[in-house]
Image (tube, rainbow, N blue to C red):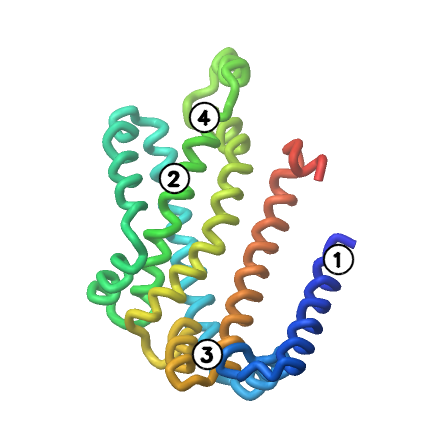
């Protein structure tokens, strides 16, 4: 029932989309019907498969892993050091405000036109949300729990791994879910500024210039499904690892 209602609603949306576009004879350039998009998806499957590998498996997953991992590690270091918290956190906050359209061309110049530059953009986009959520999660531990660990003679690192990081896990997974969508957006937009002959962003921009809107919407559909699948996977892992949290138990 949890997935049945959204799927049924989505099917009704596609049905009404098809009926309205066909009934009002909307030009394909403005809005192709779902049947046209599906036909373009089947015909362009080999190219879209390569685009998926280039964008999702390379740029998104590698950039997401590096950005979130770096944000988590830096968050732990900042929490440990007051000097880093006063010095590095404002710099990271400033870097997060740099617009994507300004970062992407620079990364293309630094790392080339292949997926490495897009992964670098994803790292920049996902670093700060993970950093902030990690700090918030580490600070969520209550004073009573910390005092109890100190009464047992636990060191800082034992307290960190046995108490504070487990408590911070809901915050970390919240950042992962946010970053899963940011990473896909960042990688696709970055491909607009320079890409080899593969990538979902490359496919959208080139086919839009050719007015092949069926394939454009097919590429958008692949990106949407990939982003949704990544989000669901992260949520599934969260429910398995943070089953003790009230929000998971009540859900």
Q: Using the image, tell me which numbered label, if any, was put on residue 5.
A: 1
What residue is rendered at 29% in x and 72% in y? Answer: 194
Q: Is residue 157 above or below residue 243?
A: above
Q: Which percent across, then down, holds residue 142?
A: 52, 19
* Residue denoted by label 2: 131
Of callouts 4 and 1, which one flags the residue occurring earlier in the amino acid sequence?
1
Nearer to me, 147 or 248: 248
Quarter of the picture containing the N terminus is bottom right
Q: Using the image, tell me which numbered label, if any, was put on residue 50.
A: 3
Q: Which percent across, then down, holds residue 6?
A: 70, 58
State how far apart marks 4 and 1 are (Cα).
Answer: 38 Å
Task: Nearest to the eye among marks 1 and 2: give it.
Answer: 1
Give residue 26's quadrant in the image: bottom right
Nearer to me, 121 or 218: 218
Q: Is residue 13 left or right of residue 229?
A: right
Of callouts 2 and 3, which one flags the residue occurring earlier in the amino acid sequence?
3
State how far apart marks 1 and 2 are (Cα).
Answer: 35 Å
Q: Is residue 17 left or right of residue 118?
A: right
Q: Which percent across, then down, holds residue 3?
A: 73, 57
């Amino acid at each position: 029932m949890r997935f049945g209602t959204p799927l049924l609603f989505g099917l009704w949306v596609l049905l009404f989309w098809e009926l309205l576009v066909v009934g009002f004879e909307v030009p394909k350039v403005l809005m192709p019907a779902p049947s046209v998009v599906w036909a373009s998806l089947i015909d362009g499957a080999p190219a879209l498969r390569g685009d998926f590998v280039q964008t999702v498996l390379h740029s998104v997953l590698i950039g997401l892993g590096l950005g979130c991992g770096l944000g988590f590690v830096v968050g732990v270091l900042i929490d440990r050091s007051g000097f880093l918290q006063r010095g590095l956190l404002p710099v990271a906050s400033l870097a997060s405000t740099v617009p994507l359209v300004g970062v992407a061309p620079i990364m293309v110049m630094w790392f080339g036109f292949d997926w490495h530059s897009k992964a670098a953009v994803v790292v920049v986009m996902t670093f700060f949300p993970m950093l902030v959520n990690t700090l918030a999660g580490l600070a969520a531990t209550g004073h009573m729990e910390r005092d109890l660990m100190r009464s047992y003679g636990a060191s800082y690192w034992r307290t960190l791994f046995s108490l504070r990081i487990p408590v911070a896990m809901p915050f970390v997974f919240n950042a992962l879910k946010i970053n899963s969508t940011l990473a896909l957006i960042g990688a696709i937009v970055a491909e607009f500024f320079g890409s080899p002959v593969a990538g979902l962003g490359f496919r959208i921009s080139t086919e839009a210039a050719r007015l092949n809107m069926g394939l454009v919407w097919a590429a958008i559909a692949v990106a949407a499904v990939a982003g949704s699948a990544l989000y669901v996977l992260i949520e599934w892992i969260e429910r398995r690892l943070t089953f003790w949290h009230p929000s998971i138990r009540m859900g």
